[in-house]
Amino acid sequence: MVLGVRLYSALYPSWGPVCLLLRSFASCSGNPASCCTMPQLGLLHGRAWAVLFGQLRRPPGAVCIGAVHSHSQVAEAALATQLKPHQEKSNFIIKTPKGTRDLSPQQMVVREKIIDMVVSCFKRHGAKGLDTPAFELKEMLTEKYGEDSGLIYDLKDQGGELLSLRYDLTVPFARYLAMNKVKKMKRYHVGNVWRRESPTIVQGRYREFCQCDFDIAGQFDPMIPDAECLKIMCEILSGLQLGDFLIKVNDRRILDGIFAVCGVPESKFHAICSSVDKLDKMSWKDVRHEMVAKKGLAAEMADRIGDYVQCHGGVSLVEQMFQDPRLSQNKQALEGLGDLKLLFEYLTLFGIAEKISFDLSLARGLDYYTGVIYEAVLLHTPAHAEEEPLNVGSVAAGGRYDGLVGMFDPKGHKVPCVGLSIGVERIFSIVEQRMKTFGENIRTTETQVFVATPQKNFLQERLKLIAELWDAGIKAELMYKNNPKLLTQLHYCENMGIPLVVIIGGHYTGKSCG
Amino acid sequence: MVLGVRLYSALYPSWGPVCLLLRSFASCSGNPASCCTMPQLGLLHGRAWAVLFGQLRRPPGAVCIGAVHSHSQVAEAALATQLKPHQEKSNFIIKTPKGTRDLSPQQMVVREKIIDMVVSCFKRHGAKGLDTPAFELKEMLTEKYGEDSGLIYDLKDQGGELLSLRYDLTVPFARYLAMNKVKKMKRYHVGNVWRRESPTIVQGRYREFCQCDFDIAGQFDPMIPDAECLKIMCEILSGLQLGDFLIKVNDRRILDGIFAVCGVPESKFHAICSSVDKLDKMSWKDVRHEMVAKKGLAAEMADRIGDYVQCHGGVSLVEQMFQDPRLSQNKQALEGLGDLKLLFEYLTLFGIAEKISFDLSLARGLDYYTGVIYEAVLLHTPAHAEEEPLNVGSVAAGGRYDGLVGMFDPKGHKVPCVGLSIGVERIFSIVEQRMKTFGENIRTTETQVFVATPQKNFLQERLKLIAELWDAGIKAELMYKNNPKLLTQLHYCENMGIPLVVIIGGHYTGKSCG
């Protein structure tokens, strides 16, 4: 038997019959008190143990004492066989819908930690929580997402209103502000969104995925809330220890200014902008080809654009663009550059300027942005050499959208907004992969105490005792059997990483029952 | 001016220029240290204050000191005007879909507290977390909900699979077990479900609502997991302090046994069962009429059923039914009665038997139950005389469903399950109403420190200082203005209940800047 169990003779005979709570040495390597707050802690035969007398009425005549020894292999083997959360879904009929998945207990633990960390950052910045329904009236989502509108999930017309599942958390937020005539609000929202994309699961993309959004709505002095959004992105990405990262920043007005001074007709701004957006995946040569061959732009204009959009740098690039003979003639571009200059000033005060790159190729897909836009990318140096680099694209992004709330208001009253969205699914993929690489074990329960017995007919005592533990707020489990084997019970503790076990039984017989 | 502000002369001139963090007396009535852990606490002019020197580099030459006085009316008035989370939605075009709603920051705070309490109970009982997609393949949900299937939301056929929004969390759990061939699992799941019911919002019923489920899957000795489910319901309902409650218990096999010995043909079991289910809302006379007139049952049979289903009591009623000359001849009923007897034994050991009523009228709507069923109801004695009684129906329910997993398994392998669902929306309505009645104020943010200034041109210093607070993990806010008025800043602290304010400024001038 892999599991060693030893019964001690009565420890403190003067105490008479006792019920001892003994610590499993397998589960916690640190201070025994760290696992579970216990009324008494001490050393017995050189080992840590804990007694629970204070909280338990002891069963009449009960006495038994034991200790569980560690065999991490047992725990691992059991973890591998007991739960198979991601089996092949192949062509078997029982499956989740395409692009969706269940989250196993292990995944839930990782996800909860990441989301807790993100939410605590949002709260540190004074945000309130908000929740909106999973679906909206279909008309609320139209004309908000440009080409991506085709990816919206519609509900079947079953009589009544036409509904669509939400595509992001930004449009519902803007709808909430307009509907309730809220002019000022700093809120966070953690929730699922749905997009009918062809799932490339390798990259951590699903049709159902979780977004963590933080937004500041209201009329304020320029760039102060915008700078806070970038500070939040830095705090979260640093806090999650995902390795080095960079936040690309640009401004829609600068892009439009560039297109204008390069001679692009205004009708082509959107099309050319979406070509520029591809510069993170394609070379300039290919993007230029697309502009000229597919979108009918004059080669000369494309070359002029190329001179701009291949630039990136720090605040000095902002200064350089201010001096640019053509761009400095464009009012919109000057506004954008002025704001970026101010933004960099604030980012310096926040101590994060070196994480930010003014990148003229950043365009962002969504229609509703009107000013500053940003996108955080991980730099491809995996934290540990053993890890395979995982292409996760951007892990956080956002920008200013001053017109969206006005689209919902019958009188068009605007509420300026700026915000960010953390791509937790992608972060989740990275953390999951890191844990796989290092074979990290995760406890999927928080159980502190297991109530065991080596003897038959002790169910009643076990039930009475565990109810007292529960009522005292202690996380406890027992085996749902009348007469479980002691080894099975201790085995379960090992597998689940339960740090403490109460072993109760009748008067001490002097014989081992392991 | 409603808000009183006073500037002290330099407190400790020997310290030279300082930056003081002063406590707002309005926000926290208790110990100043309870709001925020601070490096130093002391008394100044007889008032509590806290100094943050330890964590802050002080801006060169900055000195200012102040204290905020309380005017709860200000806070209330501002709360009423600033956020209007539930305005009349009337016939205005901007709205949430029928039967759904946004959750305002205030509501989110209450909801989070309730869910945290429920989840911590589930974890205390050793449950693992699990999440499943919002929608399932349509075929997964068919033949699971009987007459209620019409309430399922289907997604539009946009090419690809036919999908439906989940109707509960139980069927996805069974699908998960079958799909992954899991034979044993104790899991909890908190998530929204969707039902196209005619919403009666007064009763806390919505088309989108949150369920908190706990289930135990696996082959175990009888009634041990079932008893734990009832224990969990008691712990949660006691913990939430919703007033007195009662859990009705019955068994589907006893009901079937009653119908059989009363001569009901098996084809009518379901119809008669659903009539019995109405006994909590209709008199026996009306139910009897429905059985005889609408469902074609012989009056004699209905009367025999009436003799049974009007009975409720404790374990003595179980004994009485064992002695019943007709029922004791029915094998199914005897099995159910045997299990209930054992259940009561365990419930006594758990110390909750007096909360449980064996109620022969309890039938439960869903098709998939096969054994013990239960439903918790609040007894209509509002905790406080001022409160209007709120009819919320059952607040928690569940039962044993031994056949559901087998419906998903290609070979029909069964995994016995028992579980419960907490109706958090209904509990939420009760708590919300209680808070309204008592005019309780809820903080919607957790901000500990506000960074203010009475002087112009201090934005840079404020930004540097707040970044240090954030980096030290302190929840902090400032006004997004270059030169905000001091009163506006302090006003905000009052409105939001922010307990501490840092006031920074230039060298002390001897003049009030309030």
Image (cartoon, coloured by chain):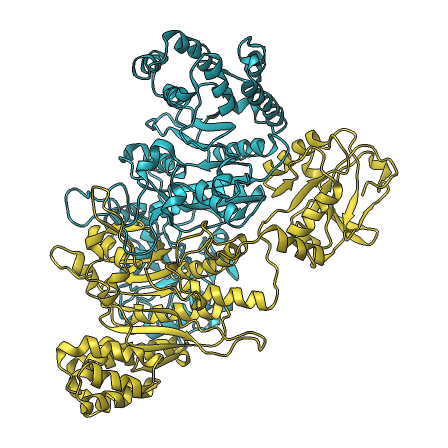
Chain colours: A cyan, B yellow
Left or right of residue B209: residue A512: left
Residue A167, percent from left and from top: 37, 41
User: Furthest residue to the right?
Assistant: B510
Total labels: the figure holds: 0
| Rendered view: A301 above or below A488 | above
Residue found 82% across the figure and 36% down from its top? B15
| Rendered view: A206 above or below B497 | above
Q: Is residue A468 visible?
A: no
Quarter-wise, where is residue B122 in the image? bottom left
Left or right of residue A50: residue A164: left
Residue A151, percent from left and from top: 31, 38
Q: Nearer the viewer, residue A146 or B234?
A: A146
> What is the quadrant of the C terminus of chain B in the image?
top right
Residue B198, percent from left and from top: 35, 64
Q: Is residue B392 visible?
A: yes
Residue A159, percent from left and from top: 29, 56
Quarter-wise, where is residue B434 in the image? bottom right
Residue found 25% across the figure and 53% down from its top? B176
Q: Nearer the viewer, residue B56 or A122?
A: A122
Left or right of residue A117: residue A73: left
Q: Nearer the viewer, residue A368 or B357?
A: A368
